[in-house]
Each structure stands twice: as structure tokens, then as C-alpha cells.
Amino acid sequence: MSGLPRIVTDAAGVDEVTAAARAAGRCALDTEFLWEKSYAPHLCLVQIAVGDEIWLIDPLAGAPLEPLGALIADPAVQKLMHAPSADLIAFGLHFGSVPANVYDTQVAAGFVGLTASASLDRLLDAVLKVRLDHNETFSDWSRRPLKDTQLHYAADDVRYLGQLVDELERRLAERSRTEWAHAEIERRFCTPEAAGGDPDRAWRKVQRRGKLSPQAQAVLIDVAAWREQLARRRDQPSGWVMKDPTLVEIARAAPRSTADLGQIRGVGKTLGERESTELLAAVARGLDREPPPSERAVPQRVARQVDAVATLAVPMARIRCQDADLAPELVANRADLDRFLEAVVAGEDLSSLPLGQGWRKELLGDILIRLVAGEISLSLNQTAPFLNVEERC
């Protein structure tokens, strides 16, 4: 597949591309953007492949991207992408596009015995034996004219995605993992949250929030949402508006006045009167909020039992993934594991937790429930590191 890309610089060209994608029912899509100094990624180029045809859509030369935002949200067109989080955030923040029918080759690879974090170069080499000559990784995509090497690099990002997806789908079907992979891709990428438009979830990304009390965690929800809204208004990275340690300290101290606010290190004179008033209002809302369930203090009895069973649950999870030829990072991290064990021990509803639903429950959740109940034991056999799961009567 060596077709030369076509440069698109106007609305008519964009309409041609989107019409071709809708007629085919699927397209490969990637973007080049800058994101160092802004809240939302600034799109500099969009690459689309339909069959053997490749278009490079240049918004800096006049091509409108709104029709591509509509294409991202169109459930009738499958978008083949690789690690698309930032691309989807860009379309979501700029055009309000909620992604639909996205296919991520990185996640799919994790269900067929490959890592779920491989670069496109590595994945193409491993699956299709295609080696790309990529040397424009750190290009400034906002500068014009684009060099021939940049155009080649950009086209290669979508050139082989159709072949890659076809082969990954074949391997998924061989392993009866198609439904698992598709469900996981949809969970990650086909939601309003994937479009980057929910400030109320920003608190989950704040570093060192785990040291806060449950009530301070509730304040952090509103304070982090305030920071996101201000960052978007300023079109600045959220960390430029206020650093995480300052945000955590505000949540802990819960200032009631501008004088209280001025005593907190890191606030300084970066906020105007309006912004300080908004921040104090966010603190007040947080003080009236119920702490999030996952952040409530864990009773000591539950914590002790979780610590004990986790010594078996952690290696069990790792080996179950190895036996199933699944990338462990797709199944659960340590926080997911601990939260699930806490819920099992405390007798809480498990259905809203990742390990309590779908393929994760089938693979690991059910056996962890039995482990906590003392219905199974683990032992090493002669072909370690595989585990024997022994039923207890």
C-alpha cells in the first residue's frame, strides 16, 4: 500500500473525504497536534485513509474540521485508530464530538497476547512485519510548508491500519476474544468522558489526593472542576492555572475567605477577584457534598482482611492474565484489585466495579470472590508459574 497522499485545504475536499468514509463504512484516522501550551490539543493535520486512498487534511491551510468532528461521532462509520485518547479529546473539546464506533488497535493487541501499550511502529512490526521509517516524531506540525518527510510520516500513520485491524480481528476470533475486545474499546473510547468534557471527573487525576480525608476529597471534586473550567477559559494546561499540591492543600484547608485563600502556598496573586470568588464558591459546594463512595474510609477490619487476601490475589491476577494470554494492564491495576476486594469483604454491591462486570468478572472477579470466601486455595505445581486452583469442600 504505497499510494501518495492527497492534500486537502478546503471544504470541498473535506466533504469528499467524509463522503468516501461514509460510503465505505470505515476509515483509518489519526491526527498531528500541539498540546504543550493549551488546554485542548491544537489540531495541525488530520490523516484519513479509506481503502488505498489517503488524504492529509490541513486546517492551517483552510480545511474546516467540523465535518470530521461529525464523522467521529457517527456510529455508522467505524474509525480505525491507534491510541486515540488525545485525538478524541481534541475533537470533543473543539467540536463537542462524543466518539462512536471507534476501534483502537492498541487495546485490541492486548487481547491477543501482545502488550496493550505498544507504539504503532512496534505493533506493525510484530503483527504485519511492516517496518516504518519514522523520523518526524518531534516535528513542529504547526509550521508550513510541511516537508516531504513529514507528509510521508503522517500518511504512514493511517496507511496500514486497515490491514492491522483485519489481522487483529482474525486473532481475536481465533481466541474467542472479539466481544471482550470490542466491549473494552467501547468502554474506554465511546463515551462523553473520552471527549474530555466532564470537569466533575477531573479530581480523579489529581496527584496525592489519597492522603485527604473523605470530606476533603469531596471538596477536591468541586475545586478540581473549577480549575478545569478556568483552564479551558484561558486555554491553558490545567497545571498552569494551579498545581496539584496547591489544589490538594485547598481541599484540605477548605478556605472560607480570600484572606484564608491567600495563606495557602501556591495561590499567590495568580487569581483575580472573580476567579477567587469562584474558587471559594467551589469550596463551599464541596463542603456540602457527600464524600465519593470509593474514597470513604475503609474500616480497619476490612483493611486487615484485604491486606491478607491481597498477598494471594495479586499473583493470582498476574498469572491468570498470563495463562489467558492477556495484557495485565487491561484487566486491573492494584487500585482496582484492592477496591474490589474491599467491596467483597464488606459485602457491597460489585456490579459497578470493573472486576464485577463483563469479561473481567468472568476472567478474574468470580475467582477472587471465591478466594475471599475461602472456597479455593492456591498452590504451585511442577510447571510453575502456573497455579492450581483447588476446590475446598
Image (cartoon, rainbow, N blue to C red):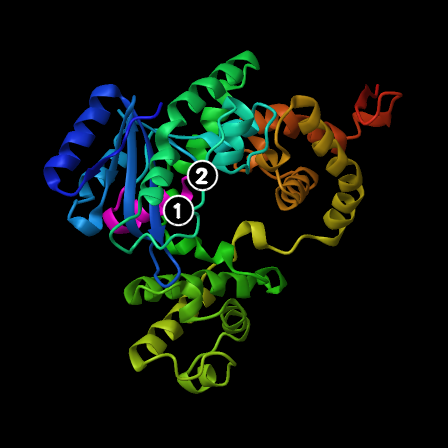
Q: In the displayed structure, would residue 347 be above or below residue 391?
A: below
Q: Is residue 73 visible?
A: no
> CA separation, marks 2 and 1?
8 Å
Q: Position of residue 261 (x, y in %)?
A: 45, 81
**Secondary structure state at the residue bearing disc 2:** loop
Q: Residue at x 38, y 23 (%)?
A: 162
Circle 2/circle 1 CB separation < 8 Å: yes
The magenta segment: 83-97
Q: Quadrant of the N terminus?
A: top left
Q: Which disc number belongs to residue 83?
A: 2
Q: Is residue 197 left or right of residue 346?
A: left
* Residue that protrudes farthest toward the top in the picture: 174
352 vs 49, nearest the viewer = 49
Q: Residue at x 73, y 29 (%)?
A: 319
* Residue that protrudes farthest toward the right in the picture: 382
Q: Position of residue 76 (x, y in %)?
A: 26, 24
Q: Which residue is mark 1?
A: 86
Q: Residue at x 39, y 75 (%)?
A: 280
364 vs 42, nearest the viewer = 42
Q: Is residue 92 magenta?
A: yes
Q: Position of residue 24 (x, y in %)?
A: 25, 20
Q: Quadrant of the C terminus?
A: top right
Instruction: Tell me which amino acid carries mark 1.
Output: Ala
The quadrant holding residue 349 is top right
Label 2 crowd bin: few (<14), some (14–19), many (20+), radius 10 Å = some
